[in-house]
């Protein structure tokens, strides 16, 4: 039986979970636990709601081992696997989306924001600085005077576990 090696194109199923068991992404339809994933609204936000769909549509994923389409630890785990083999791979936060950085949380006076912006806690926005650089943020606090934003990735500080099944070597 052929074993997967670096450079092989393969088809896999995977489920990504947090330490508490919350599914943040999966290629398996049955991992999707809310009705949001059946709607057109399912996107990045489903990750945080525990939906399990992430950005990836359900169904097996095709990737080339070693090209970094997932995390390098997943690529490394696939090497030597045969179709039907399953592995669990833990990716420490530092190697995934980094440690949570308090310095990436900042407060802006409401007077510095556009008048038509009415942010609510949980909103995901893209802010543009003076150099026309975009910064993705989530609104974490709103007061009459200020708005506090968090520019950490939603999974920053989280160790990730991927349960991977090699379906076939293409």
Image (spheres, rainbow, N blue to C red):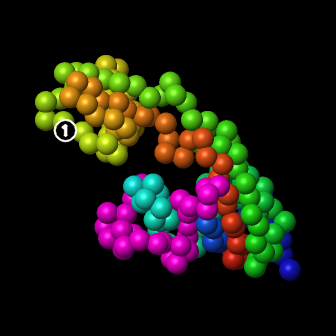
Please give left or right for residue 162 compared with residue 140 in the image: right
* Residue 38 coordinates in the image, percent (x, y): 36, 74
Please give left or right for residue 22 compared with residue 121 in the image: right
Mark 1 falls on what kind of element? loop
Name the outermost residue toward the left.
116
In the picture, the quarter occupied by the C terminus is bottom right
Please give left or right for residue 81 compared with residue 91 in the image: right
Q: Nearer the viewer, residue 57 or 7?
A: 57
Q: Nearer the viewer, residue 4 or 59?
A: 59
In the picture, the quarter occupied by the N terminus is bottom right
Q: Is residue 22 magenta?
A: yes
Q: Nearer the viewer, residue 8 or 127?
A: 127
* Residue 20 coordinates in the image, percent (x, y): 62, 57
Q: Is residue 168 visible?
A: yes
* Residue 29 coordinates in the image, percent (x, y): 51, 76
Residue at horizontal 61 percent and vertical 36 percent from the top: 99
Please give left or right for residue 62 compared with residue 118 in the image: right
* Circle 1 residues within 10 Å: few <14, some 14–19, many ≥20: few
Residue 36, by quadrant, is: bottom left
Residue with the mark numbered 1: 118
Residue at horizontal 55 percent and vertical 30 percent from the top: 101
Vertical relation: 145 (above or below) 78: above
- Number of marks in the image? 1
Tell me where the magenta segment starts and ends, as one range. Answer: 17-44
Vertical relation: 67 (above or below) 100: below
Vertical relation: 89 (above or below) 139: below
* Residue 13 coordinates in the image, percent (x, y): 63, 71
Residue 163, by quadrant, is: bottom right
């Amino acid at each position: 039986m052929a074993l997967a090696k670096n450079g092989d194109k393969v088809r896999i199923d995977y489920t990504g979970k947090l330490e508490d068991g919350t599914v943040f992404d999966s290629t398996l339809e049955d991992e999707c636990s809310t009705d949001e994933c059946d709607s057109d609204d399912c996107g990045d936000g489903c990750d945080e709601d525990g939906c399990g769909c992430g950005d990836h549509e359900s169904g097996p994923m095709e990737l080339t081992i070693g090209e970094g389409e997932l995390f390098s630890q997943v690529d490394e785990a696939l090497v030597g696997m045969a179709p039907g083999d399953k592995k669990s791979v833990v990716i420490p936060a530092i190697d995934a989306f980094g440690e949570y950085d308090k310095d990436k949380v900042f407060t802006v006076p409401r007077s510095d924001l556009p008048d038509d912006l009415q942010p609510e806690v949980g909103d995901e926005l893209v802010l543009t600085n003076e150099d026309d650089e975009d910064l993705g943020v989530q609104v974490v606090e709103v007061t009459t005077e200020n708005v506090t934003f968090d520019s950490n990735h939603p999974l920053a500080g989280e160790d990730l576990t991927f349960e991977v099944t090699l379906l076939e070597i293409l």
